Amino acid sequence: MYIIGITVFLGALLLGTLLYFLMIMPRMPGRPDTDYFKQWLYAHRGLHDNKSDAPENSMRAFEKAVEAGFGIELDIQLSRDRVPVVFHDFTLKRICGCPGKVSDYTWEELSRFSLCGSGEYIPRLEDVLKMVNGRVPLIVEFKIERFDLSLCREADRLLSAYQGKYCMESFHPLGVLWYRRNRKDIVRGQLSDGFLREGEYSGVLYFLLQNLCFNWLGKPDFIAYNHKYPNILSRRLCHELYKATAAAWTVKSEEELQRARRNFDIFIFDSFLPKTDCGARNALNGASF
């Protein structure tokens, strides 16, 4: 009986290990090339300062990023009338000082809300795409609540006509799955964090999200992870074993950037201006710095 018990235990351990490796596996066959995206540093929500005339996710912050030769990371969600708008928080209080959620208001109503008391207002994704016009790459984060994936469909209607380089990412595995099913040609990324280590979240769901256990659904091409937690085992296995591209968010100093370079390939920054070779790269690309 003892030998049978040990055999069953080892068999279960082996099966569990195999299932774990299958669950966290990113896209393998048919993975698109991400080298272009690795050539840039990405300004988080644009090159912004919330105490200036260029607050986060504003047209001016995006213009400044383009002018400086940085790629752009931005956040999108839907207004009540299904217009994709660029805004990070689900609620309006922190940035606009208004009650309610973005999804409570129509686009016309949202367009009148000032960002951080500046002369900038909530922009539409459509207007940002027209302004950037392919001059720098975009990392588009899809802000999805619960199980409503209509943002993916509405945003893709605009992005599929865009001539510039972009990739998508989301914390929500079903958003990544939507792109796996509908736009296999687009580079897709799974966002995650050391949720349990941050102390803000708890429970089985956040354990699974922290450890990328939904990768089997979306089969992401890159993993975007909080740069403070490079040694999370699942993140390391995706990068080192499965060779998935690794993106670091959000780097906030030159020192953090240099540390992140040991474990990541793509870097999203804010709160400082990185030392870069943007001038040389943009000269090759025919752009000005």
Image (cartoon, helix red, strand yellow):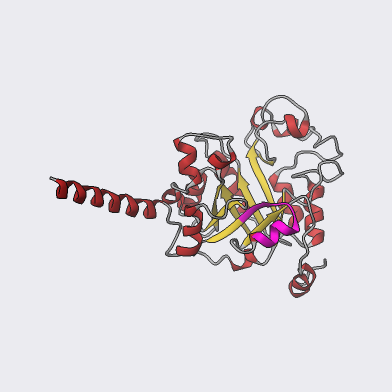
Could you say which is closer to the camera, residue 64 or residue 239? 239
Q: x, y (%) of residue 220? A: 49, 55
Could you say which is closer to the camera, residue 240 or residue 138? 240
Q: Quadrant of the N terminus?
A: top left
Q: Quadrant of residue 82?
A: top right
Number of marks in the image? 0
Residue ID at (24%, 48%): 9
Q: x, y (%) of residue 168? A: 58, 52
In the displayed structure, would residue 137 be above or below residue 145?
below
Residue 164 in view of the camera: no
Residue ID at (50%, 39%): 206
Left or right, 68 with respect to 183, comes to right
Residue range corresponding to the magenta coloring:
248-259
Could you say which is closer to the camera, residue 253 or residue 179? 253
Left or right, 252 with respect to 144, comes to right
Left or right, 118 with respect to 46, comes to right
Q: Quadrant of residue 101?
A: top right
Q: Is residue 85 magenta?
A: no
In the displayed structure, would residue 3 be above or below residue 241?
above
Residue ID at (55%, 35%): 201
Q: Is residue 251 magenta?
A: yes
Could you say which is closer to the camera, residue 256 or residue 31? 256
Q: x, y (%) of residue 282? A: 76, 70
Q: Quadrant of the C terminus?
A: bottom right
- List the single residue furthest toward the left: 1
In the displayed structure, would residue 3 be above or below residue 81?
below
Residue 278 in view of the camera: yes
In the displayed structure, would residue 68 be above or below residue 201?
below
- List the single residue furthest toward the front: 2
